[in-house]
Structure formats: structure tokens, C-alpha cells
Image (cartoon, rainbow, N blue to C red):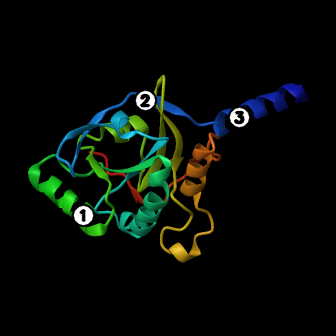
């Protein structure tokens, strides 16, 4: 009986520690280019890092310098960074505001608008910012990491775990990110 219980617990631990979510690509309007953009088309290298972002959330602002540093460090290694805004509308004025923000902040990334929160619902996003690492596989887009960027949004100097960076490095070594899920800290997702 003890052996059956131990095997059951081991199976549960393996199940919860291995995270992977496959989903089909979806098109969103890119506020930077004004064009409909397919997520799959944005994966031209090793992986795509999606960051759910909002101009309304102070946590998004706290992480911007770190996101720029990550983009600068990894873009030449086949990692592409894309922002997703689930709180903006698809209209010329909103697109102009987002494009100006990307240009002025130095983020220099695609900024997709998830007006109907299709991606939020499909990917079960609960916080802003929340990061996902996505690989393009034969079965579709595969989320191999989701969650926190690091362990201290308020003070970059106090960060002791660079969680997203570790996961990216694991992907670059063809390893599965471990842990594959880390609870993100930030603003609660507003569902519309």
C-alpha cells in the first residue's frame, strides 16, 4: 500500500513539474506596424518571449529596463521579444499611443493588441506583466515557460533570481525550463 501511495505522489509531482501547453497561432494587430500579425510568423529563431503588458499597470513600467536588457542580450541568439496589450482597443488613436510609447521608451518590440482578450483566455493569463516562452513545434505553438520575470519587481538591485533569463538560457541549451511555471507578480488581469 505504501508503494502505491509513493508511486501516486511521484506521478503527481512529475505531472505538475512538467508544464507544456500547445496552442494554435492567432493573429493580432501590431500597434507598431499597424498590420495583422500571426504569432507563429514572429518565431524566426529559437523562441518567442511574450510579455503581457499594459500602460495602466505600474509593474509593467518597473520591468521595462530589464526587458530592454533581456532583448539586447538575447535577440542576437534567436530569441524574439513581443509585448501583448490585453487592455487596449484596435483603433487608430490607441495604436498611435502604443506605438509612441514603444518608440519613446526604447522597448523597440512588436506590440500586439489583444482587444477581445483571446490570447489572455487561451493562455490563462492572470497578471500583468506575465512572461511566456513559446517554441514553434510540429503540433503548434508550445508554451514551455510561464510566469515571473524575476523575484523582485520593485527593486532591480534586490533581484536574487532572474527566472525568465534562466528559462531562456535553458531553452538555448535545448533543455526544458525548470521550473516551467513561476507565479507572476503584478497587476491583476482585468477581464472584459
Q: State left or right for residue 84 relative to residue 124.
A: left
Which residue is at 58% across, 44% downward?
171
Q: Which residue is mark 3?
A: 14
Q: State left or right for residue 38 relative to residue 96.
A: right
Q: Which residue is mark 1?
A: 103
Residue 181 picture location, percent across and down? 57, 46
Bin the neighbour count of mark 1 within 10 Å (Cα to Cα): few under 14, some 14-19, many 20 and up: few
- Observer-side mark, 3 or 2, equals 2
Q: Is residue 89 above or below residue 107?
A: above
SS label for mark 3 = helix
Quadrant for the N terminus in the image? top right
Quadrant for the C terminus in the image? top left
Which residue is at 84% across, 25% downward?
4
Q: Which residue is mark 2?
A: 23
Is any atom of residue 180 visible in this view?
no
Dot placed on the residue nearer the N-terminal end, 1 or 3: 3
Residue 177 picture location, percent across and down? 61, 44
Spatial distance from mark 1 to mark 3, Cα to Cα? 43 Å
SS label for mark 2 = strand
Q: Which mark, by number, is residue 39? A: none
Amino acid at each position: 500500500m505504501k508503494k502505491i501511495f509513493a508511486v501516486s505522489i511521484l506521478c503527481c509531482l512529475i505531472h505538475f513539474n512538467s508544464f507544456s501547453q500547445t496552442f494554435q497561432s492567432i493573429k493580432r494587430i501590431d500597434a507598431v506596424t499597424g498590420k495583422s500579425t500571426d504569432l507563429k510568423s514572429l518565431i524566426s529563431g529559437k523562441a518567442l518571449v511574450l510579455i503581457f503588458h499594459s500602460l495602466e499597470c505600474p509593474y509593467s513600467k518597473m520591468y521595462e529596463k530589464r526587458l530592454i536588457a533581456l532583448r539586447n542580450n538575447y535577440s542576437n541568439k534567436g530569441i524574439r521579444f513581443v509585448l501583448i496589450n490585453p487592455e487596449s482597443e484596435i483603433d487608430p488613436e490607441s495604436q498611435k499611443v502604443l506605438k509612441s510609447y514603444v518608440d519613446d521608451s526604447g522597448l523597440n518590440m512588436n506590440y500586439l493588441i489583444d482587444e477581445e482578450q483571446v490570447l489572455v483566455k487561451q493562455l490563462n493569463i492572470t497578471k500583468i506583466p506575465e512572461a511566456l516562452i513559446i517554441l514553434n513545434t510540429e503540433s503548434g505553438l508550445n508554451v514551455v515557460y510561464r510566469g515571473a520575470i524575476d523575484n523582485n519587481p520593485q527593486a532591480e538591485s534586490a533581484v536574487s533570481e532572474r527566472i525568465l533569463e534562466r528559462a531562456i538560457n535553458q531553452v538555448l541549451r535545448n533543455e526544458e525550463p525548470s521550473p516551467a511555471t513561476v507565479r507572476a507578480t503584478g497587476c491583476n488581469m482585468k477581464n472584459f
